[in-house]
Amino acid sequence: MDLSAISPTLLVASLMVAATPILLAAIGELVVEKSGVLNLGVEGMMIIGAIAGFSAAVSTGSPIIGFICAALGGAALSLVFALLTQFFLSNQVATGLALTLFGLGLSALMGQSYIGIKPPSSVKLDLPVISDIPILGPILFSHDITVYVALALVTGVWWFLKYTRGGLILRAVGESHDAAHALGYKVVKVRILAIMFGGACAGLGGASLSLVRVPQWTEGMTAGAGWIALAIVVFASWKPARALLGAYLFGGVAVLQLNLQAAGISVSVEYLSMSPYVMTIVVLVIMSANRSRSALNAPAALGRVFHASR
Amino acid sequence: MLRLEKRPNPSKTWAYMAPALAVFATMIGGGIMFAALGKDPFEAIRTIFYDPLFSEFAWYYRPQLLVKGAPLILIAIGLSMGFRAGIWNIGAEGQYIIGAICGAGVALAVYPAQSAFIFPTMIFFGALGGFVWAIIPAILKTRFGTNEILVSLMLVYVAEQLLASMSLGLLKNPEGFGFPGSRNLQQYASAHNAELWTGTGIHMGVMFAFIAVIFAYVLLARHQMGFHIRLTGESPKAAKFAGVNPKRLVVYCLGFSGALAGLAGMFEVSGPSGQISIDFNVGYGFTAIIVAFLGRLHPIGILLAGLLMALTYIGGEIAQSSLGLPSAAIQAFQGMLLFFLLALDMLTNFKIRFTSVGSPA
């Protein structure tokens, strides 16, 4: 094994790319959960975004159109979830699972003719001089555009939830839908918008996986990334900044284990590939063991069905 | 204007009607999807639902119904217990894999010894493997309050990696010319989960599935444990006052469903599949979630739903070869079924009222 082959600068730089899909999905789900809805269909929306973005980018040759289609695809699928949970008052856990199962099937169906194709390469930030600064250049200024979009989204969501009237209404709906309803806020409308935002973000996350991170289409390529995003929301105790930390932590583990594989460590590949999932479990345990802190922050109406009787 | 009004009691009629109507709606929705794929929708639906049962080759497909239905029913029965009590085991796929690894592991450890004790021991270890894999989220939930949905699901991916590691390493067939995968248990008499009656498709796992249905039925209808499960699902507060220990319930429900999923994996690896290989698991653990809901979490309902879902698997395979319908289409089809079911389920708990616009609501 040759550990010196692993460059810390490249490690940090690739960590940010690796974390972006889960970060995008997690920040979307955070908003959804803040509105009191638990959407377990992140995995399904991500993979639909992955194939929608991939196919659009391949057929138009433009990755930007790919990303737009990915967001639209994710939002469209989330609309099914919104319809079922908000109008048909179905169980959110079961509906979210259905969304994931359906999304995995549909994506495999849509992606049949795209296996083995290379997508057009995405736009990379390349500033003269600045991108060439040693260490800081590769870490901060020469990433794919999605990395910055994700960071901007995190900042935007943080600002929206904390400083805007809309954010306040969203949080009120998530804490007590009955009280918010009595105040005259449209609970269902707020929730549908939140669910669609979550879907669009998950779709973008999927596309950043199929267009930037991998970049290729394979069936079931999300491989649990959507579920890890859900875990990150819990880890973050529903705070955007901590979601960023969580996603980078997971990105770090994912990249490190890949680097260790490449460096020829004497542990077999399968056990290294387990590490992000095991890590997720460990982090979840640590977070939930400290019950007072995480419980305080969970939206009080999370997962509860809202039915206005009058 | 349409308005929903909560029923004082869930409607019995709609409880039976909703799944039937959902299947019908899925046929229409699926037909549209198949038409969009450029296939004749009527022919596709006929191939999936009719041909496996009544075509000229039905003698071959009918036993397959039991072979494919048994693991689905076995897993779904276990899951339904937890789902009733609001305990969500989503990781049955992982428990299924571990059950198979443990069961096959026992057989391969004693290979080529022949003894009547080998198969019962494999059954025991298969169940134990699934049980242990499911008890991890149970303990984490009761000790630390960790979300069992996420933990059980993460363990699916861990199990898949373990499966890959086993079929490439520890359990690899030493006479397999370097190909991944274990020895074929079908060629190892003491470990082979053979058909009990030739040509019926009934193997030991099918028998276990029927036993599980009866067991679950009795448990829910007659036993205190079943009462606690139903009570917790319908009114957690009442359950608390009735002295239900929620932690014990979590351990029971997850442990039971894990053991059944492990059994399903064991019977599959020693019978129809024959060997541990990288692509051994085909998603029964996830499809069983649909089966559990389609069967309305009721043992008899699950039996019927499991057979129906097996039918779509077999019909899907036929449609794949005769119509060129992609295999993923049937997966989307199954997901669609769950959507329609969840939507129509509303009718059991709510009444739709037509009110004229402007009238006092």
Image (cartoon, coloured by chain):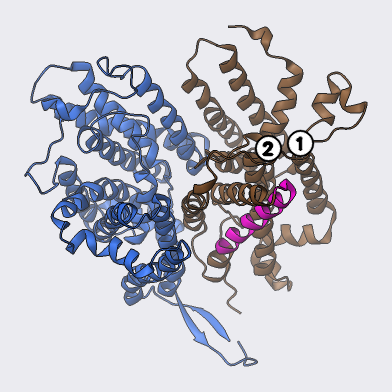
Chain colours: A brown, B blue
Can residue B237 be seen here? yes
Neighbour tally class for label 2: few under 14, some 14-19, many 20 plus, Cα within 10 Å: many
Name the quadrant of the N terminus of chain B.
bottom right
Instruction: State the image coordinates of residue A5 (x, y, percent, origin top left).
Output: 67, 10
Q: Name the residue under label 1.
A: A144
Q: Quadrant of residue A32?
A: bottom right
Instruction: State the image coordinates of residue B28 (x, y, percent, origin top left).
Output: 40, 71
Q: Which amino acid type is marked by label 1? A: Asp
Marks 1 and 2 sit apart, C-alpha to C-alpha, by: 7 Å
Q: Mark 2 points at which residue?
A: A212
The front one of A162 and A203 is A203
| A208 horizontally vs A305: left or right | right
Secondary element type, mark 2: helix
Q: Reply yes or no: does residue A105 show up in magenta.
A: no
Q: In which quarter of the image is residue A305?
A: bottom right
Q: Which amino acid type is marked by label 2? A: Val
Give above or below for B199 relative to B342: above
Q: Give the range drawn in magenta.
A: A61-81
SS majority, magenta: helix
